[in-house]
Image (tube, rainbow, N blue to C red):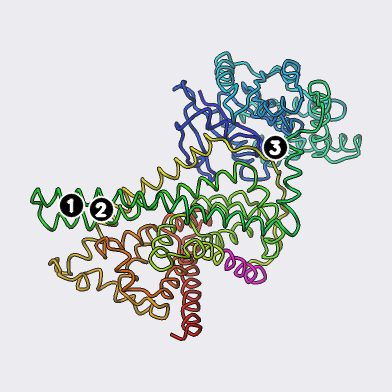
Amino acid sequence: MIFALAGNQNCGKTTLFNQLTGSNQHVGNFPGVTVEQKEGIIRKHSDAVVVDLPGIYSLSPYTKEEIVTRDYLLSGKVDGIINIVDATNIERNLYLSMQLIELGLPMVIALNMMDEVRANGTSIDLKALSEEFGVRVVPIAAAKNEGVDELIEAAISTVERKRVPKRLDFCSGAVHRAIHSTAHMIEDHAAAAGVPMRFAASKLIEGDEPMLIRLKLSENEKEMLAHTIDEMERELGTDREAAMADMRYTFIEGLCAKTVVKTGQSKEHERSVKIDAVLTHRYFAIPIFLCIMAMVFWLTFGVVGALLSDWLEMGVAAVTAAVQQWLINFGTNPVLRSLIIDGIFAGVGSVLSFLPIIVVLFFFLSMLEDSGYMARVAFVMDGLLRKIGLSGRSFVPMLIGFGCSVPAIMATRTLSSERDRKMTILLTPFMSCSAKLPIYALFTAAFFPEHGALVMILLYIIGMVLAVLLGLLMKDTVFGGNPVPFVMELPSYRLPSPKSVALLIWDKVKDFLTRAFTVIFVASIIIWVLQTFDIRFNIVADSSASMLASVGRLLAPVFAPLGFADWRAATALISGFTMKEAVVSTFAVLTGGNLQVTLSSIFTPLSAFSFLIFTLLYTPCVAAIAAVRREMNSSLAAAGVVLFQTGVAWAVSCLVYQLGRVLLGV
C-alpha cells in the first residue's frame, strides 16, 4: 500500500512523517523532476509505504511543489491519502482538504496539534466534521506521538476497504451549475485521461491550463466551457478563480461555525505575538539574530563542541597508538604500517575527531528551526535581501547552506522566479557549510587558541557580507529585474520535537561517518601513496621529493600572494575540491598526524587567516557543483560557478593578506 502524506506548510507534516516511519526512510527525487521526495515504511506495517509530499496550500499548478504533488496524486500509484490538518488553524488548512477529496481516493484526515486545541479550551466536533466531509477524521498530536497508532490503523483500514469520500460536492448556486454542466461535458475525456471527473471539472472552471491540455477537448467543447464560465462570472460579478475560492471558503466557514467552538484566543498565538514583538522588532530583530547565532557558535566551538571534540581526539589518538604498537609487535612491514597509521588512521581519524562539533551545531540549528524562529528570520531578512535583489524566500536556501551546499542549492527549487533561483544558487555557496568546520577548528586551535569562537564568527560574517556585496553588484548588471513577492506563514512558537531533532542529527552523523569511511578513506590512501613514492614508485625519504610535491609545486606560486606558497597547502586545497573535510585529512597524512606543529612551520597567523578566507570562499565540493549543474541544467554554468567562486576567493584572500602585512608592518 502506498500512502501520500499531504498538507500545508508548517502543519507538522515532517514530524508526523518521522513518527509514522521512524528511521525507515530515504530521500530521493520524484522521477524526472528535481524536487525532493521522502518515503518510508510505516512502522509495524512492512507492506505500507508513506510518501511525504511537498507542503502546499492548493493543487493549482503554480509552483513546482504543487505540480509534483498533483501529478503524483493523479499518477495511479497512490492507494490512499493521509491529509494532515493543523487544528489550530483549521479554516485555512481545510481548503486543501476539499481539493484532495475531489480526487476520489481513499482518504483520512489527521487533525494535528489537538493538544494545543484542548489547552486553549477549544473543542471540535470530530463526528460532525467527519460526516460533513465523508472521510474519517483522527485527532492526533504528532509531536507527542498521540493518536499516531490510531491514525495508522484508520489509514490502512480505509485503503483495505476502499472507502472513498462519501461527499465530493461542496458548491451551490452559479458555481454549482458551472461545475456540474462542465462535468457532464468532459466525462468521457476525464475517463480517457485517468482523471477524476469532479476534480477535472473544478480545475477547468479555475482556468487550469495543464488540465485543459490533458483532457484534449475539441474546439466546440472549449467554446462551451468558455460560455459556461462567462455566465458564472457575470452572475457572481467576480472572476473564475475568486468564485471557486469563495465557494470553498464559504463552505469551510459554515462547517467551522457548526463544528468548532472557540472559548478564546489561542494561548500559543498570544504567546507568539508577545515574543514576536521583540524577535521581529523593526530595529532589534537582526541584532538579536546575530547575538543568537554568536551564542550558538560560542557554545559549539568554544564550550560544548570543543570539549567533546577534544575527548574524541584523545580517544582516536589512544586507539591509533594501540594499533601502531600491535603492528610493531606483530612485525608488520614498515610500508604497510605507514599506510595504516600515517595514511588511514591519520586521515580518517583527524576528520572523525570533529564529529562532535557538527553534532552540536546541528542540534542548536534544528532547535531554532523546529521552534518556529527560523521562519521569523526569513521574514525579517526579506527587507534586507530585497536591497540586494532577492526576496526573503531566498534566505531559506542560504540558511540551509550553513549545513551543506547540496540541499541548499536543491532548495532553490521553491523559488518561482528563474532570476531569483540563479542568483540564489550563485550566492548560496558563500554561506560556510559544515564540511568546512574541521578546517576552521584545526586552524583556530593551532593559531588562535584564545579567540577561536571569535575567528569562527568572523568567517561566517565575512561569507554573508560578501554575498550581500556581490548581490548588490549583480542585481543591476547580470541579474536585472525585481525579486518575486514573498508570502510566508509564521507558525506559532512550539517546543521542538525531540524525535525530529534526534533524527536530523542522526542523518548528519550518518552522512558524516559515511563520507569519513568512504571518500576520505580512499582520499587518504591516495594522498599517502602520492606523498610516499616518487614518479618511478620508489619510496622517498622526504615527502618533498614525492609525486604529490611535484604537483603541488606547480600550483604553489599561484598562492604566494596569499601568503601560503608551500606545496602542501596547494595540495590540501586541491583535495578539498572532492570534499572540504579532505583538506584536514590531507594535512594529517602529509604531516604524519603531527598537525599543529607542522602547520606552524607552513603558516604564520596572518597567512593562516588568509588560508581560512580562501577555504571559506573557494569552489564548493564536487557534489555541490554537480547539484549546480543539475539545477541550472548547464555544465557551462557549473564551470562558471567554480571559476567565479575561486576567483573571488583568491582576490579577497590576497586583499586580506596584503592589507594585513601593511597594517602589521611585515
The residue at the far front in this view is 450
Quadrant assignment, res 96: top right
Tell me the amino acid under the disc marked 1: Gln
Relative to 396, is 130 above or below? above
Above/below status of 331 relative to 92: below
> Circle 1 sits in a helix, a strand or a loop, which is it?
helix
Horizontally, is 189 left or right of 525 in the view? right
Quadrant location of the C terminus? bottom left
The residues bearing labels 3 and 1 have C-alpha atoms spaced at a distance of 62 Å
The numbered dot on residue 324 is 1
* Relative side of 60 to 355, left or right: right
| The label number, if any, that marks residue 58 in the structure image | 3
Q: Report the residue at 23% width, 57% height from top.
A: 343
In the rendered view, does 439 fall on the left or right side of 245?
A: left
Check residue 114 for magenta coloring. no
Q: How many marks do you count on the picture?
A: 3
The mark closer to the camera, 2 or 1, is: 1
Q: What's the residue at 67%, 30% (across, down)?
A: 85
